[in-house]
Image (tube, rainbow, N blue to C red):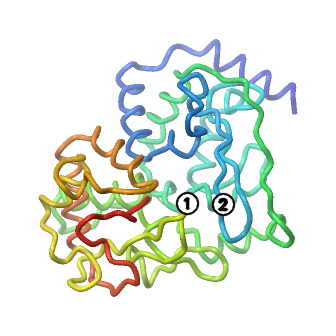
Amino acid sequence: MVGTLSAHAQARQSAPPPDPAAVQRGAYLLTAANCASCHTIPGSGSAHQLAGGRALPTPFGVFFSPNITPDPIHGIGGWTFGDFKRALRRGVSPSNTHYYPVFPYTSYTGMSDSDIEDLWAYLGSVPPVSQPNRPHELGFPYSLRLAMAPWKVLFLDQGPLKPEPGRPPEWNRGRYLVNAVAHCADCHAPRNLLGAVDRGRTMSGTRERLEGYEVPNITPDIQTGIGRWSVGDITGLLAGRGMRAMHVGGPMREVVRNTSRLSEADRTAMAVYLKSLPPRFGEVEPGGMMGGMCH
């Protein structure tokens, strides 16, 4: 295995440098997907960017994000592009083990081939960090990765996500960003007993706390959601503008820090899509301050 990793790492090092435009597009996608927030320990500084190790507490145990820098030993420097694509599309590692869905491959599977290629190009351009990965702290039976195989049969709809015919390009762009790249439902929806997103209540929020914060309803329900919000209100929050954005709390602050770096067209597309969703009653209202809104 070590020899294989070494060969892959050498092949990657000897490969021609990636297209600068692809690297730039990949950096944009990494921002939209909020990758650095999960794959970097808060306060660890730029020298440990994307080196993993952030604790992600869940009802099933504590997960620790992995190193996704191109370090050949602890990161993804020994991976091929095929390995990377399979991880995002199928939730499978280069050694054929199943990833837990705390890694949101159930959303990333919807990403287009070209976007996965661009993201790969960017990750190959960042400085490698030799930081070992920390094992997850899971009790039985959640420590059994083999259980993920039947789980995927039930809950993984392998992508890519196809545009819906008859819908405007702006709406399809928003749908793609919200569902595949930004993976909003992974936080803004309750989960069932098997840890999968409850598809019947997607985007309706949950009282299951994320880093101490309840997650609000972002469907256009008048009483408990964003039904009284305009597209401009949502776009402004994602841009970090206005009173609503000033009071964003918890992990959503990191999300808004990233969405504020997206284009206005993409933020508007996301808002248009969210406003088009079927209204669903939620247990947690966004309110005027959005204090608990989190990703």
Q: Is 19 placed above or below 273 here?
A: above
Q: Residue, x 38% and y 45% (percent of image)?
A: 32
Which quadrant, please, contains the C terminus? bottom left
Total numbered badges shown on the rendered structure = 2
For the residue pair 260 and 89, the one nearer the viewer reads as 260
For the residue pair 203 and 293, the one nearer the viewer reads as 293
Question: Residue 22's image quarter?
Answer: top left
Amino acid tagged 2 = Pro
Identify residue for label 2.
57
Amino acid tagged 1 = Glu
Q: Do labels 2 and 1 touch, CB within 8 Å?
A: yes
> In the image, is 294 to the left or to the right of 175?
right
Instruction: Bin the neighbour count of mark 1 within 10 Å (Cα to Cα): few under 14, some 14-19, many 20 and up.
Output: few
Q: Where is residue 43 drawn, in percent x and y? A: 56, 34
Q: Is 51 placed above or below 96 here?
A: above
Q: Where is residue 283 drawn, in percent x and y? A: 40, 84
Q: Where is residue 86 drawn, in percent x and y? A: 62, 48
Q: Residue, x 25% and y 60% (percent of image)?
A: 172
For the residue pair 201 and 151, the one nearer the viewer reads as 201
Q: Residue, x 69% and y 73% (percent of image)?
A: 151
Q: Where is residue 82 drawn, in percent x and y? A: 62, 39
Identify residue for label 1.
211
**Which structural element holds mark 2?**
strand
Which of the numbered marks, if any, corresponds to residue 245? none
Q: Is 68 placed above or below 124 here?
A: below
**Which structural element holds mark 1?**
loop
CA gap between label 2 and label 1 equals 8 Å
Question: Residue 94's image quarter?
Answer: top right
